[in-house]
Amino acid sequence: MHLGRAGISSRISGSFTQPSRCSPIVALAVEKESTVLTRQSPLCPVQRSRLRLEFAQSPEDVLEAQRLRYRVFGEEMGARLKSAHLGIDRDLYDPYCEHLLVRDRETHEVVGTYRILSPENARRIGGYYCEDEFDLVRLAHLGPRLVELGRSCVHPDYRNGAIIALLWSGIAAYMRRHGYEYLIGCASIAMGDGGRMAASLYQHLRRRFMSPVEYRVFPRCPLPLAALKTEWDASVPPLIKGYLRLGAWVCGDPAWDPDFNTADLLLLLPMHRLNERYARHFLKDHHHA
């Protein structure tokens, strides 16, 4: 899942919400859908009725998502992106992913995005993005039922939770339509303090949200937990908190992502664990999808 960068700027900031490993592109042979949301709940600076949830239909749509990702990950977070000279965030996984977009219908601007890597396309490209950061050997048996999320981000002017909620509703409908049963993705924690906050947060989360041992993963570049103080009072970033409320597990120790200078947690959400209240909320807009 690059669920997002917790801090996932929705890396995803968590943001959910990575330019270097764990996520999913445009060549999927699946039915595309476009849903106009008409709820009138307040959204700053626009109403929800101005937002449209859709899958990318063309290379131009994907390019718009990549420009937004660059704005958030490159300009805002200072990530080292190989495609920075083009003003976009692009990697080798993008052509194999479905790109979920939220547009402002009045400006036609993409203001939120996620990418989705199906198990079929993960096989085509040789694995999941997060396998660059984690050994997923204990998840291998989930194979054909496992979808990866990643590169979640939201435009700075639209960060009140509404965009992520719309994106999650689209993801839930996608999972139901195709019969997939598990979601994975990386949720990131900023390390501007050298990792102390990330280590403290992980120690807090592991007491309540760790997966069963049969779903544990192993970081290839572990955050040096033993060398970091963990007594800080660490608040859970909104995106990670949202995943945990949905029913996700933390699957092991955090990895250090040097490109983003973040600590990444691998999260796993079995759809049968999806919190019923949240499931009703996210699926009602797509009841007939």
Image (spheres, rainbow, N blue to C red):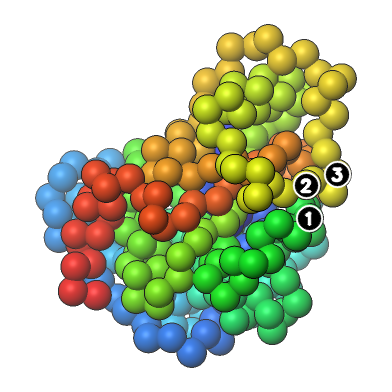
Q: Check disc 2 and report its element: helix, strand or loop.
A: strand
Q: Amino acid at mark 3?
A: Cys
Q: Are marks 1 and 3 in contact (CB under 8 Å)?
A: no
Find residue 135 and name its label: 1
Q: Amino acid at mark 1?
A: Asp
Disc 3 to disc 2, C-alpha distance: 9 Å
Q: Are marks 1 and 2 in contact (CB under 8 Å)?
A: yes
* Label 3 Cα neighbours within 10 Å, binned few <14 / some 14-19 / many ≥20: some
Left or right of 258 on screen, residue 244: left
Find residue 221 and name its label: 3
Q: Nearer the viewer, mark 3 or mark 2?
A: 2
Identify which residue, 262 or 229, lies in the foreground. 229
Give above or below for 163 relative to 61: above
What residue is shown at x 42% (from left), y 43% (from top)?
247
Left or right of 134 on screen, residue 201: left
Disc 1 to disc 3, C-alpha distance: 10 Å
Give above or below for 110 relative to 71: below
User: Which mark is first along the chain, 2 or 1?
Assistant: 1
Q: Check disc 1 and report its element: helix, strand or loop.
A: strand
Residue highlighted by disc 2: 218
Q: Are marks 3 and 2 in contact (CB under 8 Å)?
A: no
Q: Quadrant of the C terminus?
A: bottom left
